[in-house]
Amino acid sequence: MASQSEVIDRLRATFRSGVTFPEQFRMTQLQNLLSLVEENEQLIQDALHKDLHKPKFESVLSEIQITLNDLYFAMENLRTWMQPEYNIGKNLATRMDDCFIRREPLGVVLIIGAWNYPLHLILLPLVAAIAAGNCAILKPSEICQATEQLLAELIPKYLSQDCYAVLCGGAEDTKSLLKNKFDHIFYTGSQVVARSILLAAAPHLTPVTLELGGKSPCFIYGHIDIQKAAKRLCWSKFFNTGQSCVAPDYVLCTAQTRDALLPALRETLRTFYGPDPGASLDIGRIVTPRHWRRLMDMLEKSKGKVVIGGESREEDRYIAPTVLVDVQESDALMQEEIFGPILPILTIESLEEGIDYINRQEKPLALYVFSDETSVVTTVLNNTSSGGFCGNDGIVHMALPGLPFGGVGASGMGSYHGRWGFETFSHRRGCMNRSWLLERVNVLRYPPYSDYNLGWLRWATTFKKNSWGGCSVM
Amino acid sequence: MEKQAVQRAREAFLAGRPRPLEFRVQQLKSLQRMITDRQGEIATALKQDINRSQYDTPLFELIGLENEISLAVSKLAQWAAPRPVERNLLTISDQAYIQPEPLGVVLIIGAWNYPWALTLQPLVGAIAAGNAAVVKPSELSEYSASLLKALLPRYLDQELYPVVCGGVSETQELLRQRFDHVFYTGNSTVGKLVMEAAARHLTPVTLELGGKSPCYIDKDVDLRVACRRITWGKFVNCGQTCIAPDYILCEPSIQNRVVEGIRQTLLEFYGPDPKSSPDYSRIINQRHFNRLMTLLEGYTATVGGQSDSSQRYIAPTVVKDVPPQARLMQEEIFGPLLPIVTVSDIDDAIHFINEREKPLALYVFSSNKKVIRRMLAETTSGGVTVNDVIMHYTLNSLPFGGVGQSGTGRYHGKHTFDQFSHHRACLVKSLGMEDVNMVRYPPQNRQKARRVRLAMRTPLVDFSRKTYIWAVTATVFAFGLFVTLTAILPS
C-alpha cells in the first residue's frame, strides 16, 4: 500500500508531464466518470441505503442525477471553458496587442467529501477538477463506509490511476494528509474542521474552497398559498432526513401564519409519509448514533412545544419529522445548525424583526422566503446576506448549474457547480502579447524624463468615459 | 485603538451607509479629487520615502489610480446589477440570477514600493462593492503613510474608511479582529501569517505576493528593442517592483549582446553617472540595502556594481553567467541587480522555470510564434507580457494576481469589484406550476422519478452536433415531403 506522500508525488509527477492538459484527455476522463456512475447506479443506491437509509428516489435525484447533470454540462461546455478569453476591453495603447486570459490547471488538488451526500459532494468537485486539467486526491467521508469503499474500488477502475487517487481514513489520516502541499483544497463540512484546514493551508499558501453550513432561515410572510408553501417547505426540510447543508433550518412567521401553517404541515406530512412515518420507505435515518444522540439532546433541552411528531427510535436511529412552536432565540435548538428532521417555528411581529434577527446571526448558506408579495421578497433580499437565496421553494437553487453554489462569511468561501467549479480549479492568467511596432511611441515612457513626454502620455492614457478600459502607462 | 476603528466601521456598514450606489460614486469622486488636488504633496512624500522621480509618480502611481476610479464610477451600475443565468425546464418560469453584494468590513494592507497605487487601488474596488474598509498603509514608506492618514479622512467618510498606521504590533492587533475579507500586498512570509490569522475567523484573503519573475530572451529577436524594454522595467523604482523582470534566461551565444544592449540603454536613460540622475530612485531602507549588497557578494558585476550606503544607492547592476545555486537566484531580488542565467535552449528554459515556484509574472521575448506558444502553454505564472515587461499590469480588463507562492485572488478594474463582493445565487420561483413540482414529492414511484430526471436536464435544448445534423436532415426531408405532397395531391 502506497503511503500518502508516495501517492501525492506520483500525481505531481504526472501533472508535471502535462498529460492532463489536452482537452481530449479531460473529455475521456469525464466520459469514464460518466460510465462509472451510469454503470453502477444500483451499487451506488445500495451503498447509500446502507449508510444513510437513503430512499432510492433521493439517491437518484440528489446524488446520481445531479452528478450526471454536472457531467453532461461540463462535457458539453468544456471546449468553451478552455478557450482563452479574448473579449476583454482594449484601449488606445494596446490596440495593436493580443490581450487574453488563459485558464490554466493548478496542479494536484485535494477534495474532502462529506457524509450527508457522500457521492455528489465529492464527485461534483472532481468533475470540476478534471475539467480544469488538474490531478486530484479524493478523501471521502469515513462516516459513510459503504460509499467510501465503493468509491475506493470504482475510481481506480474507471479513471487514470496516475492522475486521480482515493485516500481513505479518519481524522488522524486527514491531519497527516494536510501536512502535504496541495495547489488547492476543496472542503465540504463543518466550521470547526474548516478552521484547522485553513491553518494547515496557510504555511503552503494554498487557496481553499470551503463549503460549510449554518442555520438557513425560512420566512413565510404576507400573502401566501399556505398549502403549496407547506408542501415545498416539508419537502426541502425533510429531504435526506433534514441532513442537508441547505435545508431550511427554522421558520420565521407571524402567529397568524403559524396557525394556518400547522394544519397544512400536518396534512402534507401525512400525504408524504403516511400516518406512521417510521414505517414509510420514503424517509431516511440519522447517519450515526452520535448524531442521533445530539439531535435528541437538542430536542430534550428545547423549551419549545412539540406540535407534530417527536417520536424516535434508537435502534435504527429514527426521528419522526418534528415541528415545534414557541421557540425563543435562546433555545437549545437555535444555538447550532440542526441538521436533522426537527423544524422550530419562531414567531415574529414584523418582517423587520425577522430581518434583524437574521442579521444578528452568522451569514447562512441559504435563505428562503415564501411570499406572493414581491416587496417582501425584495426587502429580505436587500437587507440580508447569505450564500444563496431561493424564493418560494427550498434547496432547488442548487440544482441549477448556472448558479454558483457556495457560502459567505461563516458559511464558507468560494463556490462551484457548472462553470463556477471550473473557475475554482483554474488559474486565470492575464496575458499581453505586445507588438514590436510602436516602439517610437514607447519612447515616451523612457528616461530621461521630461514634462513634454509626460504631458503626451497623460493625454493618451487617461480613461475617457466612453472608452473600454484604462491603460496607465504606454 | 485598532479595535475601535474596526468596530466603528462595522457599525457604519450595518447602518447601511455604503449601500446606495450614489454614495459609493460620491466617495469615489471624492477620492479622485484628493489625488488631483494633492498631487504635489504626494510626490514630495514619495521623494522623501524612496527618492521617486517627480515623473515616475504620476506615471506609476497616479494615472493608473485615476483610471481605476473613472472606470468604477462609469461602470458601477452595471457591475452591481443582477447577472441573469441560464435556466432549465424546472425553472423556466422563474427568475435566476447572481446578485453581487458587499461583504462587510474589509482590511487592506498596503505595500511600500508603490504606497499609493497598491493601497488605494484595492480601496477603489472595496468602496465600489459597497464595503467599509480599514486601510493599513505600509510603515516602511512612512511619509506616504502619514500623508494618507492626514488626507483620507478629509475626503472620505471617516468611519467607513479609517486609516490605521503603525508597525508590526499594530498590524498584528488589526489581524486579531474579525474582517469579512483581507487584502494583503507584500511578501510571502507575512502572507502566510496573514492567512493564518484570517483562518481563525474563516475570513477569505487576497494575497498579492511576489517571486522571481523570469525573463526569457530568444535568439530570434530584435535585441536592441528587447533590452531597452527590459532595462526600463527592471530599473524603474530601482528594481523594487513586484513584477520587475527578476532575472534573464538566454542562450550563451547572445549573452554578451544582451549585456551590451542593457549597458547602452542605461547610458541613454540615466547618463554615465546614475547617482546624479534625477530619474533614478534609491533603496527604501538600510536593511534592504544591506540585503541586496549581501546578494552581490562573491560576484563581479559586468555592468554597474557601485554603491553608496549613505544614500542607499546601488547602481544599475548586471551580472553574467550566474549559476542557478547562487544566492542571487534563491530569493526575489527586489532591487537593481539583474542576473543572467544561461540556458541551452527553450526546453532548458522551460524546465528551469518549472523547477521553481510559480512566479507573479513571466516574460518572453521572441519573434517566433512557436516559442511564445510553448512558453505560454508549458509554464504558469500570475500573468504574462510577451515582448515587453510589466505592461499586462496596466490593462485593467486583465485580472492581476498570483498563483501558488506568488499569491491568491486577483484584482484591477471589474475584478477588484468582484473580489470584494459576494456573488449570491438567487432563484425566485413562482408558486404556480405546482403540478410540475408534484413529481418530486413522496410517496415515490418510478414514473415520477423519470419525469423529474427529464425536467432537471440542462441545457434546455440539446445543442450537440448530432442533434443539429438530425434536425437539419429532418427539416429538409419534411420540407421535401411537403413539396412533393403539394405537387402530387391536388392533381
Image (cartoon, rainbow, N blue to C red):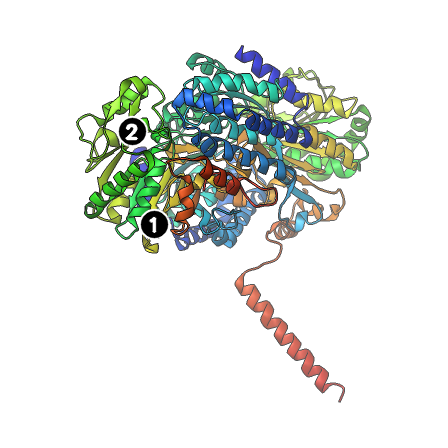
Mark 1, residue position: A19
Q: Position of residue B219 (x, y in %)?
A: 25, 50
Which quadrant does the C terminus of chain A fall into? Answer: top left
Relative to A163, is A386 on the left or the right?
right
Q: Position of residue B135 (x, y in %)?
A: 52, 21
Q: Position of residue B321 (x, y in %)?
A: 19, 38
A227 lies above or below A40: above
Number of the label disc, if any, that sits on residue B450: none
Mark 2, residue position: B331
**How far is the residue under mark 1 from the one under mark 2?**
30 Å
Relative to A59, is B252 on the left or the right?
left
The answer to whether residue A284 shows anywhere in this view is no
Look at 71% across and 19% down and name the residue there: A327
Relative to B432, is B341 on the left or the right?
left
Out of A323 and B205, give the one closest to the viewer. Answer: B205
Look at 61% across and 26% down and name the residue there: A363
Task: Give the letter of the chain under mark 1.
Answer: A
User: What amino acid type should be assigned to the residue bearing mark 1?
Assistant: Val
Is label 1 or label 2 in front?
2
Task: Give the letter of the chain under mark 2.
Answer: B
Look at 62% across and 39% down and name the residue there: B75
